[in-house]
Image (spheres, rainbow, N blue to C red):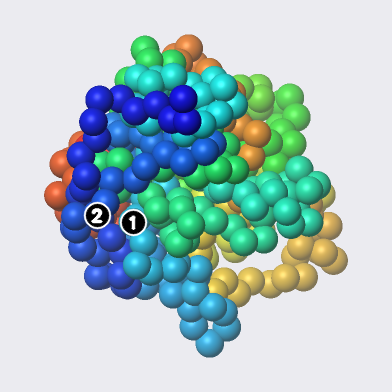
Amino acid sequence: MSSRIQDTLPRTMRAVVCYGPEDYRMEELPTPTAGPGEVVIKVDAAGICASDVKCYTGAPLFWGDAHRVGYCQAPITAGHEFIGTVVALGEGAGAKYGLALGDRAISEQIVPCWECRYCKRGQYHLCDPHDIYGFRTRTPGGFAEYMKFPTGSLNHKVPIELKPEFAALIEPLACSMHAVQRGSIEFGDTVVVAGCGTLGLGMVAYARMKSPGALIAVDVADDRLARARQLGATHTLNPRTQDVVAEIKAMTEGYGCDVYIEATGHPAAVEQGLLAIRKAGTFVEFSVMRELVTVDWTIIGDSKELNLMGSHLGPYCYPAVIQSLASGAVDGSVFITHELPLEEYVKGIELVHAGKDSLKVLLKP
């Protein structure tokens, strides 16, 4: 049989389509079908990411400016954090991915081309075409009732026992795990995670597993710092009321932290990290910045000889993240603050943008 379909899928579905900054529309689109090697899921939950907010509000990375071409290829169904139930399998897809109808499944956020220099070297997360769900023409996203995992995608079965709301955290937490890996944390290190949004909190959770001597979470929101404590932070600092650099120096005999992971998306946190880190320390930059960042670049080389590491997506991390959530090693309930129907996507984006009373906001088609 060339394909398998669960029941009869509707001919059309609701989807949130991005046309441009602040121009997202709920539309009726054809329900995707599964060709050879493809998987169709019914979306159970989709998370709203800070990157979605930056795209919605017109950040140059997504729409371009004098320095670069925009990344978003509108019109496109938005959403790159999602989890769903398999409802159709194209020829060969079930065997390839170990999936059956009714299974819970996720696809890694990037669909590699498998032909470019990076893909051939195993660095598929740096794929040159860079087709990420929710932003590129080839990869419509999860702000919809149904979505398709195309040929060449990286798909994983997720335990059905794992609540879909928690499973929707797999994508951001894979990014968190990769950032921690890039930090090469040693036993006893003093580690700082700046920014306690979903991604930063995930970094706290996975950095804790590296047995640092001190794990310092930094954020301007006390509620988020409390959540960081729940996930393993040993110290918390609020730059609105504390001198973060001075406090870190005081904890480390004046030397500075060993590893600093920047996850705020705010330029001030970059300078803060360069000042707070010791000589020959490791600075991990994760954030998608809305604006250009200007710092004293000399600190990296002549002053401190830092190890400067970038971090992008969550390559090779999905199985371990799935296991950490399914086992309870990472408590998914710490992250989720809102669950909204798909129709309230604008409210959800605004909640994330405000960042005051929300953390992870989920849309439930």
Residue type at tag 1: Thr
Q: Which residue is mark 1?
A: 77
Query: In terms of depth relative to the viewer, which is nearer, 315 or 120?
Result: 120
Q: Which mark is residue 139?
A: none
Q: Residues within 10 Å of mark 1 (few under 14, many from 20)?
A: many
Q: Residues within 10 Å of mark 2 (few under 14, many from 20)?
A: some
Residue under the point 14% across and 49% down: 343
Spot the residue most to the front: 1
Spot the residue most to the bottom: 66
Q: Nearer the viewer, mark 2 or mark 1?
A: 2
Q: Is residue 39 above or below residue 114?
A: above
User: Could one spot residue 283 in this view of the protein?
Assistant: no
Q: Secondary structure at mark 2?
A: strand
Residue under the point 24% across and 54% down: 29
Query: In terms of depth relative to the viewer, which is nearer, 121 or 6?
Result: 6
Q: Which residue is mark 2?
A: 29
